[in-house]
């Protein structure tokens, strides 16, 4: 039975979402419980998968028992398994948080739909990370962009609607470009399965070199639009800034990352390092990511809305991840993959605590947070911990990924990017630390009032994330050792 | 490639350009329906009848109706 | 001005893609890479393996049935999203 | 729109459109077509009815919960058929390997799960399209 | 630079690319959201045309099997495009719902005007 875990991680949330839409769009309390149980089960299932991968190597599943070039294949390697565990764990925490708070943010009669959409988004993320078939990946990508846009628009305010339209239009451009790339690569190789494409690609490149290059270009354009690398980031701040809290958290922490996982698979498994280092991809990626890091941080400094600031910070952090990929070195890539995890934890924590504070104080402005730390210590401590991790203070997890990224930059012989990381850490400090300092030591402008109670689920969620931040800072060896064989395989060390 | 296919392709291009240029959204949507139907014909020419039927029903039928529905609740002129 | 810049960029991309097109496998040639063992099997074995005559139906509901599950989910997502947006 | 000619003609046409849609769905595995195209054709007949007769009064509408149930149940049915493959000892969405009888190619009842799945897709797509259209064109439709 | 004979052979691909760019251009240059959605649909069906053209074989026939001595076209692109069409209809429907809702809030579906209104409010 254990072999069926792989399809179950996608089918279980989908079936739960269908059941929610079938039985209880109105009785949202059942939807709440169902989604909590579903994500909890998913955490268990993905952990089982990760252990299977650790023991037996990549888990392979053929749908309908049709072997790969004919049917659809799930291939879960170490990177995917790592990502799957991360996705399910963080969405479990977010659901836990949302159960206490969400019904205050959006209308009651769309709550059933909200949970269904959330589970569908989750299923699509898990599907993208596990699928080894390009067209299947494309279908899940479309599911993820439609459901993510719906999760942004669901609270029905004007800004969120506008952001959602922008997001949908741009991500359609991205998917168009991706579909064209898939058509191109199918045309020259005749396969849709990544393993088979990788085998057929050298021959195809000999016959149709321009086609392969165009494919690579279209993939890069499509995936960078979807994951909001710098010049294509324009949809991100609005969408992540105006969505409901739990949506922002999951969008920033997980959704933009999954496209990077697809990108990694394409670059390192299909096109291979050898081919990629011949084309000027490294230059483009590094330039764009350096711009993303610096300009994202600078734009974040100018924001007064706390969620918008966090969204711009995401733009900068996506830059870090792409920089790690673009360095094309072992340590750089390790840093990038670790940063996917660390940023997911930190950003989920920041968005959740910021959303909680917004709900409790009723203000979105950064300056109005003065003195809040003494009234609501728990969310503000979580926020501060996230900020410190973002800046890269050593015992916390943000430091670890920056460390590996810097090592990777040195390994690639590009010390200038170490400088970029240092400057951006300084800039991060410039916009995060004043909030923390004024929240704990500043004088509140408001007269003191009786603090509202914090929902118990929200407290548990924040405490879990705090522990994770410290844990992955102190024991960074656990993910590193888990990922090491996969990365070594890619770099043929 | 036959003459019919070439003519259909040219008609497609004209439809696409006109759908972009015309200011009246209703006309634009009708031209888009013509574009979809031509596309369906072309797919029939390429021996893909399943896709042709689906495009005729979905692209030319439902998408057009949905666009009309949306225009009826918003404004007609660009 | 912004439009003009965009137009020039698009024309440039178009010319590049035309360069790619003239290198592509010739249209309708039976020896193209796409007509490999994958499509061979779909054509030769479908009747035997799935018992239906329409190869396209066999692919969407059997060989690649998981794609269709995704497709249904997209439709359902569109409905759930539409209801959520129109009612919010 | 609410012209007599249109009403009479559409009343005459709708059954034919529906029969055609049903044919496309049911014969999807033997001739061009399938669940998606046929479901849309069936839906378009209902949409034609709505257009010809105007937005219907409450008691004449297709009830909201009916389309909702068909949509979600269609999707759940698909998952259920997929899981049957697992329960019968093979993989998710297994068809002939899971022991579904394939029948004689060319007959209506051939193809194992394919026929069932196409039918479920057809029903689901038809109700989906009706829901999408009626919600887009109409202001507020509460759930019944 | 251009080999026109080869280009004429591949006219289907070329036209698909030109239509793709036309749709892209409509999406970029028009501020009206419904026009953008029409452009989106044009763009996507252009890609579908490209995909279907890949599977074509000269002298082939439709993949309704069971006939003797017939060359069939490649059925896989057709199957993929069926999925693609449904996906694009769903995206269109959802985008239209967003547009309708935006119109209720702002009284316009023009992106530039919406931006102006927002600036005026801020």
Image (cartoon, grey):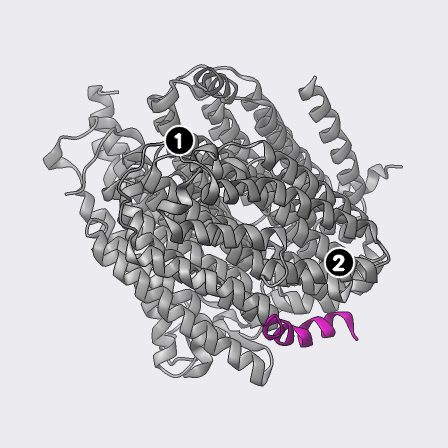
Q: Position of residue B12 (x, y in %)?
A: 59, 30
Q: Position of residue A406 (x, y in %)?
A: 75, 58
Q: Magenta residues, as a range? A: A475-493
| Quarter containing the C terminus of chain A | bottom right
CA distance for labels 1 and 2: 42 Å
Q: Secondary structure at mark 1?
A: loop
Q: Which residue is mark 1?
A: A445
- Identify the residue at image location x=50%, y=28%: B32
Image mark 1: chain: A
As drawn, which residue projects farthest toward the right? Answer: E1
Q: Is residue A105 left or right of residue A326?
A: left
Question: Which of the 4 image quarters holds residue D52?
Answer: top left
Classify A120 as above or below D96: above
- Identify the residue at image location x=54%, y=22%: E31
- Identify the residue at image location x=49%, y=18%: E119
Image mark 2: chain: A
Classify E117 as above or below D22: above
Q: Is residue A446 left or right of residue E26?
A: left
């Amino acid at each position: 039975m254990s072999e069926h875990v792989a399809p179950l991680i996608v089918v279980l949330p989908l079936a739960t979402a269908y059941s929610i839409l079938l039985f209880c769009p109105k009785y949202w309390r059942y939807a709440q419980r169902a989604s909590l149980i579903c994500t909890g089960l998913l955490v268990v299932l993905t952990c089982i998968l990760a252990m299977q991968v650790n023991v037996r190597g990549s888990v392979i599943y053929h749908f309908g028992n049709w072997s790969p070039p004919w049917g659809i294949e799930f291939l879960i390697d170490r990177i995917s398994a790592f990502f799957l565990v991360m996705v399910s764990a963080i969405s479990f925490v977010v659901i836990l948080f949302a159960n206490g708070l969400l019904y205050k943010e959006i209308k009651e009669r769309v709550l059933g739909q909200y949970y269904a959409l959330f589970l569908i988004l989750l299923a699509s993320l898990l599907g993208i990370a596990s699928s080894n078939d390009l067209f299947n990946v494309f279908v899940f990508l479309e599911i993820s962009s439609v459901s993510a846009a719906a999760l942004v628009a669901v609270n029905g305010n004007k800004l969120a609607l506008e952001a959602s339209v922008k997001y949908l239009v741009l991500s359609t451009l991205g998917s168009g470009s991706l579909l064209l790339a898939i058509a191109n690569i199918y045309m020259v190789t005749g396969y849709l399965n990544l393993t088979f494409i990788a085998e057929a690609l050298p021959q195809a490149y000999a016959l149709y070199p321009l086609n392969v290059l165009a494919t690579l270009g279209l993939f890069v354009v499509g995936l960078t639009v979807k994951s909001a690398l710098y010049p294509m980031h324009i949809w991100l701040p609005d969408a992540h800034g105006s969505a409901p809290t739990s949506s922002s958290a999951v969008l920033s922490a997980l959704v933009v990352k999954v496209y990077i996982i697809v990108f990694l698979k394409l670059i390192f498994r299909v096109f291979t390092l050898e081919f990629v280092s011949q084309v000027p991809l490294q230059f483009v990626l590094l330039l764009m990511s350096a711009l993303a890091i610096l300009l994202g941080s600078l734009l974040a400094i100018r924001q007064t809305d706390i969620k918008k600031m966090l969204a711009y910070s995401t733009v900068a952090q996506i830059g870090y991840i792409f920089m790690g990929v673009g360095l094309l070195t072992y340590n750089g890539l390790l840093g990038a993959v670790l940063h996917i995890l660390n940023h997911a934890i930190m950003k989920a924590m920041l968005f959740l605590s910021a959303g909680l504070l917004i709900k409790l104080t009723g203000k979105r402005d950064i300056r109005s947070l003065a003195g809040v730390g003494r009234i609501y210590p728990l969310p503000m401590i979580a926020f501060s911990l996230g900020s410190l991790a973002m800046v890269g203070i050593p015992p916390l997890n943000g430091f670890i990924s920056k460390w590996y990224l810097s090592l990777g930059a040195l390994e690639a012989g590009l010390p200038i990017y170490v400088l970029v990381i240092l400057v951006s850490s300084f800039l991060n400090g410039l916009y995060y630390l004043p909030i923390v300092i004024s929240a704990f030591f500043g004088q509140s402008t408001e007269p003191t009032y009786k603090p509202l109670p914090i929902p118990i689920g929200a407290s548990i969620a924040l405490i879990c994330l705090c522990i994770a931040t410290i844990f992955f800072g102190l024991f960074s060896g656990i993910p590193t050792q888990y990922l090491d064989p996969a990365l070594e395989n890619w770099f043929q060390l | 490639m036959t003459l019919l296919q070439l003519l259909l392709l040219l008609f497609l291009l004209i439809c696409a350009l006109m759908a972009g240029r015309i200011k009246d959204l209703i006309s634009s949507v009708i031209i888009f329906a013509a574009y979809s139907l031509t596309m369906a014909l072309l797919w029939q020419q390429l021996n893909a009848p399943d896709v042709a039927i689906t495009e005729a029903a979905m692209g030319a039928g439902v998408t057009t109706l949905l666009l009309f529905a949306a225009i009826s609740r918003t404004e007609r002129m660009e | 001005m912004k439009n003009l810049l965009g137009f020039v960029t698009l024309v440039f991309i178009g010319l590049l893609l035309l360069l790619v097109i003239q290198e592509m496998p010739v249209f309708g040639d039976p020896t193209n890479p796409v007509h490999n063992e994958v499509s061979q099997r779909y054509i030769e074995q479908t009747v035997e393996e799935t018992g239906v005559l329409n190869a396209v139906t066999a692919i969407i509901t059997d060989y690649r049935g998981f794609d269709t599950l995704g497709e249904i989910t997209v439709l359902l997502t569109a409905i759930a999203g539409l209801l959520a947006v129109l009612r919010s | 729109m609410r012209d007599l000619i249109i009403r009479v003609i559409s009343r005459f046409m709708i059954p034919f459109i529906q029969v055609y849609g049903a044919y496309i769905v049911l014969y999807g595995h033997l001739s061009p077509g399938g669940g998606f195209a046929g479901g849309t054709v069936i839906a378009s007949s209902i949409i034609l009815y709505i257009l010809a007769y105007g937005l219907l009064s409450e008691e004449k509408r297709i009830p909201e919960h009916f389309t909702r149930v068909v949509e979600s149940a269609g999707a759940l049915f698909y998952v259920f058929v997929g899981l049957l493959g697992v329960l019968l000892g093979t993989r998710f969405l297994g068809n002939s390997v899971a022991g579904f009888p394939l029948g004689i190619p060319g007959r209506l009842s051939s193809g194992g799960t394919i026929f069932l799945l196409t039918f479920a897709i057809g029903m689901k797509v038809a109700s989906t399209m009706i829901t999408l259209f009626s919600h887009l064109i109409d202001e507020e439709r509460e759930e019944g | 630079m251009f080999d026109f004979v080869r280009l004429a052979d591949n006219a289907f691909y070329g036209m698909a690319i030109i239509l793709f760019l036309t749709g892209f251009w409509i999406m970029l240059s028009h501020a009206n959201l419904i026009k953008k959605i029409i452009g989106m649909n044009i763009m996507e069906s252009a890609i579908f045309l490209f995909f279907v053209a890949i599977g074509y074989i000269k002298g082939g026939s439709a993949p309704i099997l069971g006939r003797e001595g017939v060359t069939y076209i490649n059925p896989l692109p057709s199957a993929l495009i069926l999925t693609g069409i449904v996906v694009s209809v769903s995206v269109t429907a959802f985008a239209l719902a967003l547009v309708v809702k935006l119109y209720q809030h702002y009284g316009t579906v023009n992106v530039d005007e919406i931006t102006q209104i927002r600036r005026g409010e801020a």
